[in-house]
Image (tube, rainbow, N blue to C red):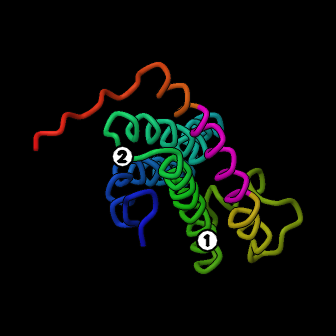
Amino acid sequence: MRIGNHSVKEHFLFLTPLLGFIAIVWMIRLIAGALNFPINIINLASVTAATAVSAILAVLLIHVRNFGGYVNVVIASTFLTLWGHLLIIAAIAFAVLTETTNIYVAPEFSVAGDDPLHIKHMLGHITFALGGGSLMGAIFGCSLFFVIRRILPLKPQKNFR
């Protein structure tokens, strides 16, 4: 399946460093929570912020490497947002399955009055957070891409045939 002249695999390969960055921030947040760091310190390792930074970097990389256009920006935003929320859901599911507590099921980061299985919390991430995050990332990313293309237009490539 091709999306904007690139396959899904090419998109994932292109985004691999950014997906890794989000995973590292997620792991830092888990470890900091397990070590009982102060909440102010734990909040610095935000998966949501890492996803936003990754989306901005993806837009810059798409432009600089001439990877594609607006469709690729939307796909990159969606993949990065999906990855971040899947990691969060995995941490919640792990806490539920092992009957332990981690930063993602702590009361200050959970849905008030949620059941012990945190179903509302996980559904919130996979529906509203994923949908809203992808939409906002796509809007902001495409706006940034538009500005970058106007400020730094790509030079036409020479045809050496």
Give the number of the disc on residue 95. Answer: 1
Q: Is residue 30 visible?
A: no
Q: Position of residue 99 (x, y in %)?
A: 64, 77
Q: Does 139 lie within the magenta span?
A: yes
Residue at left offset 41%, top offset 66%: 8
Q: Residue at the far left: name it.
A: 161
Q: Amino acid at mark 2?
A: Phe
Q: Position of residue 48 (x, y in %)?
A: 61, 46
Q: Amino acid at mark 1?
A: Ala
Magenta range is 129-143
Q: Is residue 147 above or below residue 77?
A: above
CA gap, disc 1 to disc 2?
Answer: 39 Å
Q: Position of residue 58 (x, y in %)?
A: 44, 42
- Residue denoted by label 2: 67
Image quadrant of residue 106? bottom right
Estimate how packed mark 2 is, as few (under 14), some (14 to 19) or many (20 or more) residues with alpha carbons within 10 Å: some
State whether the magenta stretch is mostly helix, strand or loop: helix
